[in-house]
Amino acid sequence: MSGEAEEKAIQLVQDPLDSQCDDEHLLKVSATVSFNWKVIGRRLVGIKNVQDIDREEEQCEQEKRDEMFEKWIEMKGSKATYRVLIDVFEEVKNPLAAHAVREIVSRNATSGLCPFPRHP
């Protein structure tokens, strides 16, 4: 492969953090990362959606977190990326949560079980 062709091929490989979040990874984040879902939700899905989710009295906090992530993916589609989630965690001064998301993505990207392409 020529140098130019190789460079183009490398450019086509997507950074896993720029991939759309998937349910499996968001469930891991939701279950293992400490964060205030209402604060994060306001930034991801807006205050109206957070209020609607919070009205569900029969749901526990974990279920509300999961629903917030589902709504985010529904609203943003391919723009609901791990990088956006990390940026929001950093914006609300939760670097531990941002780091945990990076770790979850990194672990899955190197395991071969990842739904998105590996970074070269």
Image: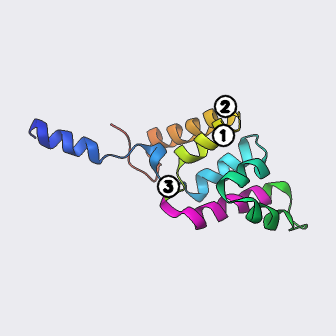
Q: State the residue position of label 1.
A: 89
Callout 2: 10 Å neighbours few (<14), some, many (20+)? some
Q: Residue at x 61, y 33 (%)?
A: 99
| Residue type beneath disc 2 | Pro
Residue 90: x and y in percent read 64, 36
Residue 7: x and y in percent read 19, 39
Q: Is residue 72 magenta?
A: yes
Label 1 SS: helix
Label 2 SS: helix
Callout 3: 10 Å neighbours few (<14), some, many (20+)? some
The region drawn magenta spans 63-78
Q: Residue at x 28, y 48 (%)?
A: 12
Residue 20: x and y in percent read 50, 55
The numbered mark, 1 or 2, whose residue comes first in the sequence reads: 1
Q: State the residue position of label 3.
A: 20
The alpha-carbon separation of the residues under discs 3 and 1 comes to 17 Å
Q: State the residue position of label 2.
A: 95
